[in-house]
Image (spheres, rainbow, N blue to C red):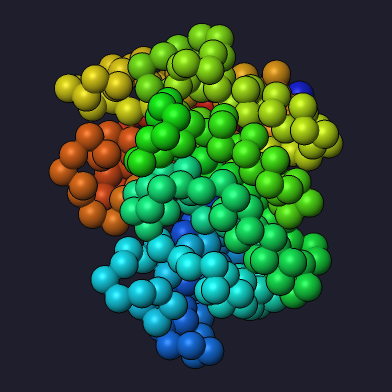
Amino acid sequence: MKLSHGRSNIRWNWCARWGAPWIVEYFPWAYVEGQPGQFDWSHSDQVIDMAQRQGLSVVARLGFVPEWARPKDTSPLYLDEERFADFGRYAAEFARRYAGKVDHIIIWNEPNLALEWGYTKPDPVKYTALLRTVYTMIKAANPDVQVLAGALAPTLAPPGSESGENDLTFLQAMYDAGAAPYFDTLAIHAYGWHFDPDDPAHPDVVNFRRTELLRDIMVRNGDGDKQAMITEGGWNDHPRWTRAVRPGTRIAYTIRAYEIAQDEWPWLDAVSLWAFRYPWDQNSYQDYFTFVRTDFEPKPIFEEVKRYTQGHGS
């Protein structure tokens, strides 16, 4: 669905019949290339073919390293520089295979967190080197695909932290390392914690409008002509998590976030909030990010956002 008022290029993370055809989906490298050069695309084909039949546009996130491409006993999110080209070949094959079906590819997820960077200290220079290698290989395979970088976790980690690096600092360091020519769109994670979506952006606060600070960094580095996408974000309504809000507040904040993106951010192409559904219960606060339960039973937030999107036409 494209909204019929204001800018028409904002799409929402819902199945087509429920309001809008846009999904962010994970395609782990290890699931496809279990052995070097041996690709099994059966699951990826199934997901993308189903998305095509449902009229859904896919933003593909790539990552997750097979055992053969990393040292023994390391995390599947650990990747040495000498293996960047191996990952690039997978990404290029993905881009080639799904040309005309997948137009957006995200390179890695939250590389500014040690958890997502193989339990090593986040390194914007190394991540930029990964972008440089993979971007070039993807574009050679499919020049039309849009490569997304960033997907940074919004965090206030202090300087020198071993667990993470502040997303604003990390993005500027990417630019300093020469990242600009090696991505087409910035992927942004925009979590609201317990703050109102209209609360102003501030470097010392994680809130929805922190998105604007990332955009400011793009502009200051001469990248103002590029667009951005929110590929994760939203609010949590767990009854006891300190960063959560009440269910009714979550609904109101979520709908207001869509309005802000639609009406105020012409440089933003899409808003995809975390998360539609998990394949199994997490048995933690994470379950309270979802819009439907594991059995596909809709939550009230799903019904209210569906009503909102359908009220804006198609």
Q: Residue furthest front?
A: 160
- Residue 299 sits above or below residue 41 on the image: above
The residue sitting at 42% across, 70% down in the picture is 65
Number of numbered discs visible in the structure rendering: 0
From the top left corner, tell me how far across and down residue 61 is, in percent: 53, 57
User: Horizontally, is 60 left or right of 191 in the view?
Assistant: right
- Residue 165 sits above or below residue 52 on the image: above
- Residue 103 sits above or below residue 173 on the image: below
From the top left corner, tell me how far across and down residue 249 is, in percent: 36, 15
The residue sitting at 82% across, 34% down in the picture is 222
- Residue 210 sits above or below residue 299 on the image: above
Whether residue 279 can be seen here = yes
From the top left corner, tell me how far across and down residue 43 is, in percent: 44, 75
Q: Quadrant of the N terminus?
A: top right
Q: Quadrant of the C terminus?
A: top right
User: Horizontally, is 217 left or right of 90 in the view?
Assistant: right
From the top left corner, tell me how far across and down residue 82 is, in percent: 54, 73
Whether residue 234 can be seen here = no
User: Horizontally, is 10 left or right of 169 in the view?
Assistant: right
Q: Residue furthest top?
A: 199
- Residue 104 or 80: which is nearer the viewer? 80
The residue sitting at 24% across, 20% down in the picture is 242
* Picture quadrant of residue 130: bottom right
- Residue 227 or 70: which is nearer the viewer? 70
- Residue 70 or 2: which is nearer the viewer? 70
The residue sitting at 45% across, 12% down in the picture is 196
